[in-house]
Image (spheres, rainbow, N blue to C red):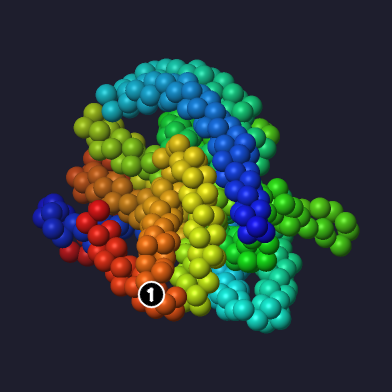
């Protein structure tokens, strides 16, 4: 008889462990939060797409006013992004950022890229992590922050876009821009070399940076060899002469 | 003109020149370099911490596996021997909680545990497997999440409390592993000729299976995989019970095991096509 009672006890216990309220409540609560996050991400991804479109003007023979207008416009739309992240901050439980961050990681990387691009067009300098967080509206938040890896990923994305920008600038007769980009990306490259990257996605993305560097260098080379650029013209050409 | 001939294939070695120039001209005071130095330090810190936790996790896994092996030896009729094994297992489990798991918890203080969960999830699951197996052998029962979660509360010298992140989900995964040990034990018990235990174990796993199925609502890969393994173990055990029931009167008890093992093989082949 004792075996029977032991079994009954077990049955009760397992009911508690697996079928009882606790794990179910836990999983349902998690599902609810994820649903909320997905809703908010929709609100963030909409301005994300808009900014992407707005900034594509750099590849469409822009003049200075158009560039400035695009940057202003982008900064304006970033306000919607900031609202989205503020809402996100409200629903993520404390110390659980990394439990859910798959939902917003990709969008955050894209937004970092866009913010970095805006800052580069406006000032020509590299956006800092703090500035990026500010533009995205995730600075000084309690439950969310800008992950360093997401920021770095955004920077690497920008390098690819700048490679395209360099090529198109030449097409539109702007021979100075590629030199600026070349210097900028070379600095980026030097910076990334200081990082000890693990064999992760960031490392893979960084490995692709060299192709962007190469592309930009080729553009600069084409310009300098024809003397099309004031700065790279004579000096560069003669420097390369002896190597032939 | 010679410059233009240099284009095309031979352009490659020359192309990097400007980049090289820029790199050489960058000094330590370059703002980009200063920024990246800081990022490098941050990344290194994070990676180091991750690796340290992985090391602890590996230690936990090894010790847990040894404890499980030890517990499998408790399958004996001699009560005193069983008691001494249980005592040793208990001591070693407590040691893991107080040293390795504590070390992980200390690394995770002031951190978002979920960031490093992947570094120690394997050790944690293995530990849960060993712990529940011990509890089951001792009490025919396992503790619920709250009780076990309470084990992971620590205090430092100044009396400040900190605890190891132990998501319910990890608990369920650990229990799923634990059923594999029950299956092994079920077969072993049969070898000894202890038939009642077979039914008991099988029944217990049945309940776990029911419970896990109730949690399968969302498409989680790891849980689905474990649920599949769990189902296989359960089918094996149910087959054992079936054989005991139908042939138990025909064959001497100690020979039942060979009958079941031969039908096991057949069963595995079937699974292949399933």
Residue A163 in the image: state x and y as whole percent: 30, 41
Give the residue number, with chain letter if any, for mark 1: B251
Give the side of residue B51 with respect to residue B109, left or right. Answer: left
Is disc 1 placed on a helix, strand or loop?
A: loop
At x 29% / y 51%, what residue is drawn? A211
What is the crowding at mark 1: few (fewer than 14 residues within 10 Å), some, or many (at least 20)? few
* Viewer can see residue B143: yes
Frontmost residue, A37 versus B72:
B72
Frontmost residue, B102 versus A213:
B102
Give the side of residue A211 with respect to residue B158, left or right. Answer: left
Which residue reaches farthest front? B249
At x 39% / y 60%, what residue is drawn? B242
Residue A77 in the image: state x and y as whole percent: 48, 19
Chain holding disc 1: B
State the image quarter where residue B21 is shown.
bottom left
A42 above or below A200? above
Frontmost residue, B39 versus A147:
A147
At x 68% / y 74%, what residue is drawn? B86
Frontmost residue, B200 versus B34:
B200
At x 63% / y 66%, what residue is drawn? B137
Residue B223 in the image: state x and y as whole percent: 45, 49
Residue B142 in the image: state x and y as whole percent: 64, 56
Q: How many marks?
A: 1
* Viewer can see residue A130: no
């Amino acid at each position: 008889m004792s075996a029977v009672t032991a079994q009954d006890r077990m049955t009760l216990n397992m009911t508690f462990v697996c079928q009882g309220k606790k794990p179910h409540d836990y999983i349902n609560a998690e599902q609810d939060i994820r649903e909320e996050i997905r809703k908010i991400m929709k609100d963030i991804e909409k301005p994300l797409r808009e900014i992407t479109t707005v900034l594509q003007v750099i590849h469409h023979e822009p003049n200075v006013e158009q560039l400035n207008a695009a940057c202003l416009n982008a900064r304006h739309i970033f306000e919607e992004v900031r609202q989205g992240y503020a809402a996100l901050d409200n629903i993520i439980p404390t110390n659980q950022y990394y439990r859910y961050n798959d939902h917003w990681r990709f969008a955050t990387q894209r937004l970092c890229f866009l913010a970095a691009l805006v800052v580069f067009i406006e000032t020509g300098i590299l956006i800092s992590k703090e500035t990026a967080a500010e533009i995205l509206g995730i600075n000084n938040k309690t439950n969310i922050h800008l992950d360093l890896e997401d920021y770095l990923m955004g920077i690497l994305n920008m390098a690819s876009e700048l490679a395209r920008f360099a090529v198109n600038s030449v097409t539109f007769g702007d021979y100075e821009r590629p030199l600026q980009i070349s210097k900028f990306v070379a600095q980026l490259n030097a910076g990334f070399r200081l990082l000890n990257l693990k064999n992760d996605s960031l490392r893979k993305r960084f490995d692709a940076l060299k192709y962007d560097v190469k592309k930009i260098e080729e553009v600069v080379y084409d310009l300098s060899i024809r003397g099309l650029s004031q700065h790279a013209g004579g000096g560069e050409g003669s420097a390369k002469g002896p190597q032939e | 003109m010679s410059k233009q001939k240099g284009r095309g294939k031979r352009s490659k070695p020359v192309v990097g020149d400007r980049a090289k120039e820029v790199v050489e001209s960058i000094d330590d005071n370059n703002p980009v370099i200063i920024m990246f130095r800081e990022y490098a330090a941050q990344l290194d810190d994070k990676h180091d911490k991750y690796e340290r936790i992985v090391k602890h996790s590996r230690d936990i896994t090894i010790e847990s596996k040894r404890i499980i092996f030890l517990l499998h030896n408790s399958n004996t009729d001699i009560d005193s021997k069983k008691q001494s094994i249980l005592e040793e297992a208990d001591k070693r489990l407590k040691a893991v909680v107080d040293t390795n798991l504590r070390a992980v918890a200390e690394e995770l203080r002031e951190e978002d545990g979920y960031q490093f969960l992947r570094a120690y999830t394997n050790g944690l699951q293995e530990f849960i497997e060993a712990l529940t197996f011990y509890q089951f052998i001792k009490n025919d029962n396992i503790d619920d999440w709250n009780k076990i979660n309470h084990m992971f509360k620590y205090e430092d010298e100044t009396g400040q409390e900190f605890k190891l992140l132990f998501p319910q989900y990890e608990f369920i995964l650990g229990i799923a592993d634990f059923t594999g040990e029950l299956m092994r034990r079920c077969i072993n018990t049969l070898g000894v000729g202890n038939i009642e235990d077979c039914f008991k174990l099988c029944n217990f796993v049945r309940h776990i299976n029911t419970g896990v199925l109730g949690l399968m609502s969302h498409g989680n890969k790891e849980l689905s995989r474990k649920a599949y393994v769990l189902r296989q173990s359960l089918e094996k055990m149910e087959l054992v019970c079936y054989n005991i029931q139908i042939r138990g009167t025909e064959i001497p008890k100690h020979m039942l095991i060979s009958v079941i093992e031969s039908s096991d093989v057949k069963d595995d082949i079937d699974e292949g096509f399933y």
